[in-house]
């Protein structure tokens, strides 16, 4: 495995325009962006460090700056590293919260650590002595540590042949995994873990994994939108219990007047899982920054978007739809909770984080390891069975991997119910990848590929910077080809 060295580059560039040249709206937007950047930093430091330590691993603030806080979306990228932070620990040494300065006249942005549910961001403006009896938060703690602003981080790969063509590599599985770290599958991409798990007779046959320096089998990372596929798995468990059915209305219970009712009452769980609710979203991908980094709650942010298309007719990738699918199974999740399924699968290094009121942010905010995600894939290889117990309905795998609803435009990928598919209704455009393959995909290069006909799960974790993309289809093709020769 190659070694990575991280060096501090020049000071971060200041991009703020002179105040005199800014309109009132530009000043408001710049202020809001700074508050979001501080929340982003507080939550990433809290989650990366707190969740790693809970698993016996170690992450430092410097490591988080080098990976999670480098190459993120504009305009937060040029703000986030320039903000001072403070890590506060309890007398037990467990992380209590992280505070990040962003404005002299406003309280620091706070992310609080909970042992059971990881970190939650407090609302913008919440003071450091903020308390919520419903979550039993105690912010007063000892053993404080702080950090000055870090310069921009530049990633340097030492003694590595960049962008080495796969044809020049050995075709062994190990060589293909190593190639994931070399830029072979996307120039400038940053792989932290590559793992392949194969099954024989429904049982683990072999698992091969490679990790970047500073990461290992116990080091969780944010799953980003891979959490949507985890959410679809929870929905499957709720359907198996008889508590819910995918044809059920989501149950937001909007207005009814006489014989008419709000059309949102007709949106089903299936519509939400297939990104076909018909609801409006203000940005491609339905950016949920107020929820993720602003400290808003799921109930405040995700429920009230209006319908602009008949449900089930138009694909629109939207974080809010997944959040509503989970809201629809509230009673089931309130009784069992994410940990029930995680423990059964042995996903012991995985935590589903929540908003500050306890609402599950299962569109993105799960922290997990590559090995744990491979177990999720194995559950699907086994068609919902685990150690002799059925955890998902029979044929749930076919349901989530069936691109039967409206499909995304401008891509060869199809979309099922919470999972992406390598085939579309009109066919499979990916050479060397079976028609039954499907995948969970997340921001910054998180992938879990399930190939039932080959009994293979492929996991790739990364912290890819904006403007780079890991070619998971080519990687999957080469992994399958290497396995065929062994």
Image (cartoon, grey):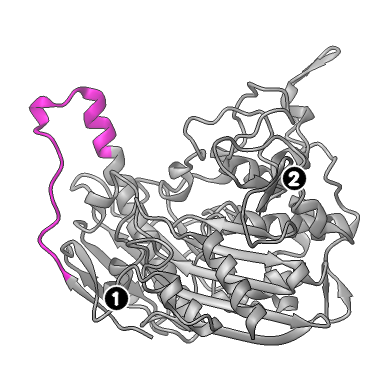
> What element does badge 2 sit on?
loop
Residue stretch in magenta: 8-31
Q: Quadrant of the C terminus?
A: bottom right
Q: Quadrant of the N terminus?
A: bottom left
Numbered disc total: 2
Give the residue drawn at x 27%, y 67%: 86
Q: Which mark is residue 328?
A: 2
Task: Give 107 or 101, whichever is nearer the viewer.
Answer: 101
Badge 2: residue crowd in 10 Å (few <14, some 14–19, many ≥20): many
Is 18 covered by the magenta stretch? Answer: yes
> What element does badge 1 sit on?
loop
Task: Give 425 or 287, whichever is nearer the viewer.
Answer: 425
Give the CA distance from mark 2 to mark 1.
50 Å
The residue wearing badge 1 is: 161
Q: Which mark is residue 362?
A: none
User: Is 425 situated left or right of 44 in this image?
Assistant: right
Task: Give 109 or 345, whichever is nearer the viewer.
Answer: 345
């Amino acid at each position: 495995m190659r070694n990575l060295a991280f060096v501090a580059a020049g000071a971060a560039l200041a991009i703020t325009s002179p105040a005199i040249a800014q309109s009132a709206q530009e000043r408001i937007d710049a202020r809001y962006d700074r508050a979001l950047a501080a929340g982003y930093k507080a939550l990433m430091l809290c989650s990366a460090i707190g969740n790693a330590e809970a698993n016996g691993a170690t992450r430092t603030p410097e490591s988080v700056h080098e990976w999670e806080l480098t190459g993120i979306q504009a305009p937060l990228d040029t703000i986030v590293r320039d903000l001072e932070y403070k890590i506060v620990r309890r007398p037990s040494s467990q992380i209590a919260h992280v505070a990040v300065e962003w404005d002299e006249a406003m309280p620091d942005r706070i992310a609080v650590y909970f042992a059971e549910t990881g970190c939650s961001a407090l609302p913008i403006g919440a003071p450091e002595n903020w308390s919520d009896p419903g979550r039993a938060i105690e912010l007063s703690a000892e053993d404080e540590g702080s950090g000055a602003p870090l310069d921009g981080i530049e990633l340097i790969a030492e003694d590595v042949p960049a962008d080495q063509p796969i044809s020049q590599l050995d075709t062994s599985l190990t060589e293909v995994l190593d190639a994931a770290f070399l830029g072979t599958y996307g120039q400038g991409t940053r792989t932290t873990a590559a793992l392949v798990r194969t099954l024989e007779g429904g049982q683990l046959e072999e698992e091969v994994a490679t990790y970047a320096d500073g990461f290992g089998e116990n080091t969780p990372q944010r799953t980003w939108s891979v959490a949507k596929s985890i959410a679809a798995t929870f929905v499957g468990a709720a359907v198996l219990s008889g508590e819910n059915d995918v044809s059920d209305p989501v149950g937001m219970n909007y207005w009814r007047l006489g014989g008419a009712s709000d059309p949102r009452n007709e949106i089903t769980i299936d519509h939400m899982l297939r990104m076909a609710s018909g609801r409006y979203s203000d940005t491609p991908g339905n950016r949920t920054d107020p929820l993720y980094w602003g400290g808003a709650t799921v109930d405040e942010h995700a429920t009230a978007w209006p319908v602009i298309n008949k449900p089930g007719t138009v694909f629109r990738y939207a974080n809010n739809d997944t959040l509503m699918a989970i809201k629809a199974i509230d009673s089931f999740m309130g009784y069992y909770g994410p940990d029930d399924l995680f423990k059964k699968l042995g996903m012991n290094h995985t935590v589903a984080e929540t908003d500050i009121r306890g609402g599950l942010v299962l569109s993105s905010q799960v922290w997990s390891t590559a090995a744990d995600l491979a177990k999720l894939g194995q559950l699907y290889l086994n068609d919902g069975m685990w150690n002799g117990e059925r955890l998902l309905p029979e044929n749930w795998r076919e349901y989530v991997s069936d691109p039967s609803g409206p499909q995304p435009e401008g891509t060869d990928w199809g979309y099922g119910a919470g999972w992406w598919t390598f085939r579309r209704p009109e066919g499979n455009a990916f050479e060397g990848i079976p028609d039954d393959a499907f995948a969970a995909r997340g921001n910054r290069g998180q992938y879990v590929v399930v190939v039932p006909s080959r009994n293979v799960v492929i996991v790739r974790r990364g912290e890819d910077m904006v403007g780079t993309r890991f070619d998971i289809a080519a990687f999957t093709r080469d992994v399958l080809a290497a396995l065929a020769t062994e």
